[in-house]
Image (cartoon, rainbow, N blue to C red):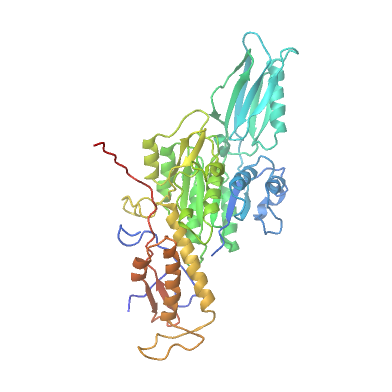
């Protein structure tokens, strides 16, 4: 008999149930049917109906008491232009099939970020227009009328009026004597990731103080208290939201320097333990530098945590994460197929080009191949710039890129798709066992040639048959190496307690195809 199989927190007197644990990247270096909803945790504005009860940590979604099923619902509940509204809109633009929930997070106490544009005159004023873009959303265009004639004061005032009329923007605008000020609708340092760009489209005589995309400044305050309260509520509600999508980014604002990102990582790790059984994942974004973001991925080093990264991107970290998580969950539907786990180049082929839709940085910057290579080796999912001013996922990567405690690179579970396969395999295995052996008695396997187990009795051999069926199912879809997995399968009745049958599956997950090397030799 093999050694007893132990799971964290599972003892002889544990409550009846089927418990599962996935140990990622076990063994040699050469080894390789549930609710898969998503939940957004983000700030809201006072114009949303959910604002008055934000301290109650109420979740909104398609089946909650107060439902949230459409973008308009998100606007009504969370306020137009709020981070929660915009993240919902980005998710649903990609994926309308995955159940999506929102848990509003109380905002920081501090100062809202601002972006300032000064207009001056130079030469003869002619008819024309000025474009101003906030984040990835469509630019707001203001006309210039030289026959009135307009002045910098009236032009700035008109720009402010047009911006305020576009309720879906994350800012409000004011003007004074030709100076336009944009102010984030939500207080906090995270507003400094809002990126704005103004441009004279036509006409002459107007000079802008900023002619390149730039981040807002002067935002102060972290919503760490609000995040902690929201996570505490999720920890006890017993619901599984497979993807956590935080507004908080994996960057110098929300990273381990202020512990906000670390709170998310800790929760994901704790809830995934067998005694809780909520195996979930975190997808965060970063528009910070790759070097700064790597500091966060290194601190996390967790296979259930992913960071999507594109420096100097107009899309905020939260909205970047929403787009990525929407794409992942769109394709990871059960029964899982091989095409649902590999996201190399997602956004740059005929199937996915209209789904991802994250614009390239307006300043024309693009990560170099060296930077992209470095990112994928240090726990980041980087985006590359492709034709048409768009971007695509280079490779979906988890933050687990080195062996715990050693700092040695370990690529066995850097592929996010392998986590998906493991999770869905265990979900299906648990479901099959529960359905096959409800309220059974337990017995040891009969001796060779003996009578089979009577009805109502479960033996290790019968459990083995169920496990073998699930293994065969996944092997038939190309997700795992069935032969090697069967060869390492252990099913046994334990000695203490004798009421337990334990199963150990050495799951040989098939590698994802990443590289094809071609050599052409002219003869």
Can residue 341 be seen here? The reply is yes
Residue 11, how many percent across, how many down? Answer: 44, 74
Horizontally, residue 193 falls left or right of residue 466, namely: right
Viewer-proximal residue among 190 and 409 = 409
Which residue shows up at 45% across the image and 56% down it?
Answer: 338
Q: Is residue 133 above or below residue 481?
A: above
Residue that lies at the very extreme toward the right in this rendered image:
148
In-front residue for pair 234/436: 436
Q: Position of residue 19 (x, y in %)?
A: 48, 70
Quarter of image, res 190? top right
Residue 159 vs residue 478: left or right?
right
Name the residue: 38% across, 66% down. Answer: 482
Can residue 15 be spotted in the picture? Answer: no
Quarter of the picture containing the C terminus is top left
| Quarter assignment of residue 79 | top right
Residue 519, relative to residue 236: is it above or below?
A: above
Q: Which of 27 and 48 is in front in this view?
A: 27
- At 43% across and 34% down in the image, what residue appears? 367
Spot occupied by residue 153 in the image (x, y as percentages of width and height): 70, 18
* 487 shown above or below 375: below
Query: Could you tell whether 10 is left or right of 406 in the image?
Result: right
- The image quadrant where one finds the N terminus is bottom left
Q: Is residue 519 above or below residue 122?
A: below
Where residue 147 appears, x then y in whole percent? 74, 12
């Amino acid at each position: 008999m093999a050694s007893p199989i132990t799971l964290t927190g599972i003892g002889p007197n544990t409550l009846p149930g089927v418990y599962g644990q996935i140990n990622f990247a076990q063994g040699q270096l050469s080894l390789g049917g549930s609710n898969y909803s998503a939940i957004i945790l983000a700030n809201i504005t006072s114009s949303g109906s959910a604002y008055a009860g934000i301290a109650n940590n109420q979740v909104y979604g398609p089946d909650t008491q107060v439902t949230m099923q459409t973008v308009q619902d998100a606007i009504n509940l969370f306020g137009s232009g709020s981070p929660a509204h915009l993240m919902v809109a980005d998710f649903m633009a990609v994926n309308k099939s995955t159940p999506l929930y929102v848990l509003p997070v109380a905002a920081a106490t501090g100062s809202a970020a601002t972006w300032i544009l000064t207009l001056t005159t130079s030469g003869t004023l002619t008819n024309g227009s000025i474009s101003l873009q906030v984040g990835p959303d469509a630019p707001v265009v203001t006309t210039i009328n030289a026959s009135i004639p307009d002045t910098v004061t009236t032009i700035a005032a008109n720009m402010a009026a047009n911006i305020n009329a576009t309720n879906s923007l994350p800012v409000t605008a004011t003007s004074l004597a030709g100076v336009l000020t944009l102010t984030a609708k939500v207080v906090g340092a995270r507003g400094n990731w809002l990126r704005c760009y103004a441009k004279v489209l036509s006409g002459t005589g107007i000079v802008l103080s900023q002619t390149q995309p730039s981040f807002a400044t002067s935002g102060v305050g972290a919503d760490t208290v609000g995040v902690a309260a929201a996570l505490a509520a999720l920890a006890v509600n017993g619901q599984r939201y497979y993807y956590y999508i935080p507004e908080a980014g994996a960057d110098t604002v929300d990273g381990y320097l202020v512990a906000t990102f670390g709170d998310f990582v800790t929760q994901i790790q704790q809830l995934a333990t067998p005694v809780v059984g909520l195996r979930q994942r975190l997808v965060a974004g970063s528009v910070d530098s790759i070097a700064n973001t790597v500091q966060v991925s290194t601190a996390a080093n967790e296979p259930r945590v992913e960071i999507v990264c594109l420096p100097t991107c107009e899309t905020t970290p939260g909205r970047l994460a929403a787009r990525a998580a929407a794409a992942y969950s769109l394709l990871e539907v059960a029964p899982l197929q091989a095409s649902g786990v590999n996201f190399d180049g997602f956004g740059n082929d005929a199937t996915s080009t209209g789904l991802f839709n994250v614009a390239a940085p307006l300043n024309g910057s693009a990560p170099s191949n060296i930077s992209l290579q470095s990112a994928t080796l240090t726990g980041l999912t980087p985006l590359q710039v492709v034709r048409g001013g768009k971007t695509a996922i280079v490779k979906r990567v988890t933050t687990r890129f080195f062996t715990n405690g050693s700092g040695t690179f370990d690529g066995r579970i850097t592929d996010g798709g392998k986590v998906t396969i493991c999770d869905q395999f265990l979900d299906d295995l648990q479901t099959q066992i529960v359905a096959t052996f409800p309220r059974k008695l337990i017995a040891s396997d009969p001796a060779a040639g003996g009578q089979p187990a009577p009805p109502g009795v479960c033996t290790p051999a019968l459990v083995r048959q169920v496990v073998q069926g699930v293994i065969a199912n996944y092997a038939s879809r190309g997700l795992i190496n069935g032969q090697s997995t069967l060869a390492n399968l252990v099913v046994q009745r334990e000695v203490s307690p004798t009421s337990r049958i334990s199963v150990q599956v050495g799951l040989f997950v098939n590698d994802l195809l990443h590289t094809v090397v071609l050599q052409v030799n002219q003869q």
